[in-house]
Image (spheres, rainbow, N blue to C red):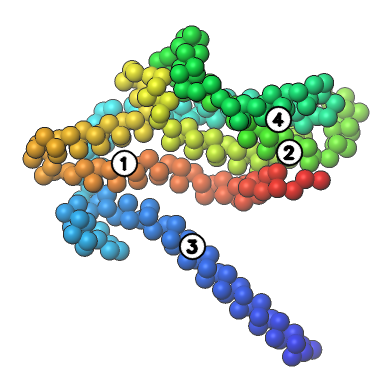
Amino acid sequence: MVTKKGVTLMSIKLSANLWIGALLTAFAILTFLPFYYVMLASVSDSNLIKEGELLLLPRGFNLKAYGLIFDNPQFLHSFMVTVTRTVLGLGVNLLLQLTIAYALSKRYLPGRKAFMLYIIITMMFNGGIVPTFLIVKATGLIDTIWALVIPTAISTWNVILLRTFFENVPDSLEESAKIDGANDIYIFAKIYLPLSLPAIMTIGLFIAVHHWNAFMDAVIYTSSADLKVLQLFLRDMVIQMEMAALMGDMSAMSEVSSLSIRTASIFLASLPIIAVYPFIQRFFVKGVMVGAVKG
């Protein structure tokens, strides 16, 4: 039998859940609106946008901005360069960071504290752009895809997070595996990696987003058109449209405005990462708490 007090508590709980749901829905809408506006602006008449006539539906629908981008033969090449850079960067970064974090998670590692201190120092201080460029040049990486991967292969923050996650794996699992004759490589691959999948997927998402969005290192370390990443290609295209407008090139302005090119570029650059996120969301929800609880 449900008492009056129980009914009151249930009513309060239901009311609280409704308020929380409404608040989260409002935040979700506010987060989605900028992306939705960019998508609308990329397929609408830029003149109507400037006049404030763009609301919830596209006005003067056209795909000329996307056609101009896709018709450029450099687009597909730059897209593949960015995909290659992201895949290579993801693989190299995860391999190095996972192995370092696994080693540092072992309390019996000789010099563990010294190694950890050395890694933390790099988190606070770095050599700067010029020394890093000189190192990349001296190692022969200039104008190669590896110049976009190796200089940022180690993230101190990611190593610390992964080390904390590995430390939470029960020692009894490792001890049991060693009794059965397993070596460190087998233990790492068959025990630690499967148990750490949420953390790995979360860190992997951060790494992939970094490599997908990065373009400053491409500006510094590459000059060949064969290594032009997607972000750099889209930036150059926007600059070309704005220069054409300043020079009074009416033919270019009448076809596609710089505003349409900018919004279409933002949408295209963001779309791949947004498309991938739903498939790893279940891992991300668990992985965002990496390192939050220890013991």
**Tag 2 secondary structure:** helix
Q: Which residue is mark 2?
A: 164
Residue hosting label 1: 265
Q: CA distance from mark 2 to mark 4?
A: 8 Å
Q: Find the distance from the CA under tag 2 to the CA under tag 1.
A: 39 Å
| Circle 4 residue | 101
Viewer-nearest of discs 2 and 1: 2
> What amino acid is labelled 1 in the image?
Ser
128 sits left or right of 169 in the view: left
Residue 100's image quarter?
Answer: top right
Q: On screen, 68 above or below 63?
A: above
Q: Position of residue 278 (x, y in %)?
A: 52, 49
Q: CA distance from mark 1 to mark 4?
A: 37 Å
Is 51 placed above or below 146 here? Answer: below
- Residue at disc 3, secondary structure: helix
Write down the residue under mark 3. 27
Which amino acid type is marked by label 3?
A: Phe
Q: Secondary structure at mark 4?
A: helix
